[in-house]
Image: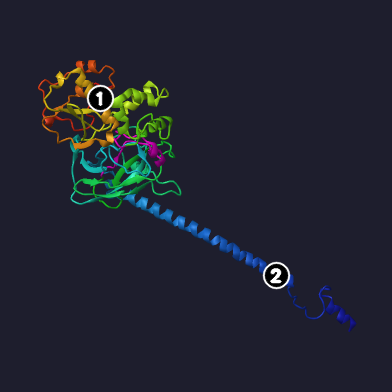
Amino acid sequence: MAAKRLLDDSGRDPAEPEGKKMKTRPSFAAVISEAVMVKSLQNFCSALEPLIRRVVKEEVEHGLRRSARLQLQRSPSLQFRALEPSSYILSFSNKLSLPVFTGSKLEDVDNRPLQIFLMNTEGGQQFRTSLPQPIKIEIVVLDGDFLSDEREDWSSEEFNNKIVRERAGKRPLLTGDVAVTLRDGYASIGEFSFTDNSSWIRSRHFRLGARVAPGSYQGARIREAKTEPFIVKDHRGELYKKHYPPMLDDEVWRLEKIGKEGAFHKKLASEAINTVQDFLKLWVVDYAKLRRVLGVGMSDKMWEATIKHAKMCPVDNKLYRCFGRGFTIYLNSICQVVAIMPQGQNYQISNLTTSQKAQVDQLIKDAYNQWGSLEELDGHNLSENALVATPGYMEAYSTQHQDLTTSIQQNEFFDGGFAELDNLPTNSHMAYDHGWS
């Protein structure tokens, strides 16, 4: 019996416990560790999901674009349409008014709205034309270096590649009527303006461009329009810009070499010279005093530049009447003599005596000093008895001449005694080009 038990036990693993082996239970720490691991995996998957979605989306879009390009390459009809030559072009009717400031209305050099024409270049000549149906036109901003080689032709791809978009976080570069309809070969652009300057691009210049709005026209290509390159400055610069030409009611610092709130501006203001009209009146009546007011700080070169700019100012049709002993004189808005009406008898202007000429000169000075009390008239309503001054006469009675008598004798006056009132100068730059310097 003992031998049998020894034989039966010989095949048993001595390390195996006796009886049925019991299944071990996991410890509490193991359970917690496993739960933490599962939670971490869930968090990782949640964080990874948006990234996977974005990558998949980008790959799908890339595949669609590639498929569209392959389809275009395999379609001869589409290729032909893309390369089809056309004699139609868009063209801006006029040059852009410069300088250009942000927020300021864009106009042409004649201060009118910009216009776009449809032109036909068939036969090597350009002439206006039209299409049976209206076309949508889009106004865009181009980089100033577009076609720096001055080529007269370009592809749509070249044009589109040079379109400038707004900077990150900024409004669209152009705001306003930037989408117009071309009807009967013509479109007028309403109010539109820049919202940003051009200093942030490499060329520092913009161009305006006009193209057929994508998807609005299926015919032969119409070549885009473009302007010359220009700089766009911030609006704050416009607050100090000069006017060309200056107007009578412009503030005097709009003239060249006179800065706003600068030394010359303050000197003029101290003498009640606040507008361009005030400046020109004193220049006509007593140019030497005006020169003294500005002082030695204004060099002769600066003085000449300021006067030249002021003389661009157009003169209106207003006249001012001043009564004196034996004469009534008529002055324009800058105190120039326009006509004389003798009282009691008729005088030949060329026969006025030295004392009469001096009397007229004194009347001019009195009129200047009492400008606010002068009678204002319409320049078209002078009496037929008025002696209308020639340009030489107006020059003679300006006290900028040191020797009044000599100046008058050196000028030619009309010999007929009375001028036709229809010949009275009524407009702009009345005497500026007749010997004044």
Q: Residue at x 40, y 32 (%)?
A: 270
Q: Nearer the viewer, residue 193 or 350?
A: 350
In the rendering, which numbered label is found on residue 32? 2
Q: Is residue 176 magenta?
A: no
Q: Quadrant of the C terminus?
A: top left
Q: Quadrant of the N terminus?
A: bottom right
Residue ID for mark 1: 362
Secondary element at tag 2: helix
Q: Which residue extends farthest bottom?
A: 1
Q: Position of residue 173 (x, y in %)?
A: 38, 46
Q: Position of residue 224 (x, y in %)?
A: 29, 42
Residue 434 in sight in this render: no
- Which image quadrant is residue 41 in? bottom right
| Color scheme of the displayed model | rainbow
Judged left or right of residue 7, residue 293 is left
Secondary element at tag 1: helix
Query: Which three-letter amino acid code belongs to the residue tagged 2?
Result: Ile
Q: Residues within 10 Å of mark 2 (few under 14, many from 20)?
A: few
Q: Earlier in the sequence, mark 1 or mark 2?
A: 2
The residue segment tinted magenta is 222-249
Q: Residue at x 26, y 30 (%)?
A: 367
Q: In the displayed structure, would residue 408 be above or below residue 119?
A: above
Residue 408 in sight in this render: yes
Majority SS type along the magenta span: loop
- Which image quadrant is residue 154 in? top left
Judged left or right of residue 137, residue 103 is right
Q: Is residue 228 magenta?
A: yes
Q: Position of residue 347 (x, y in %)?
A: 12, 23
Q: Nearer the viewer, residue 32 or 205?
A: 205
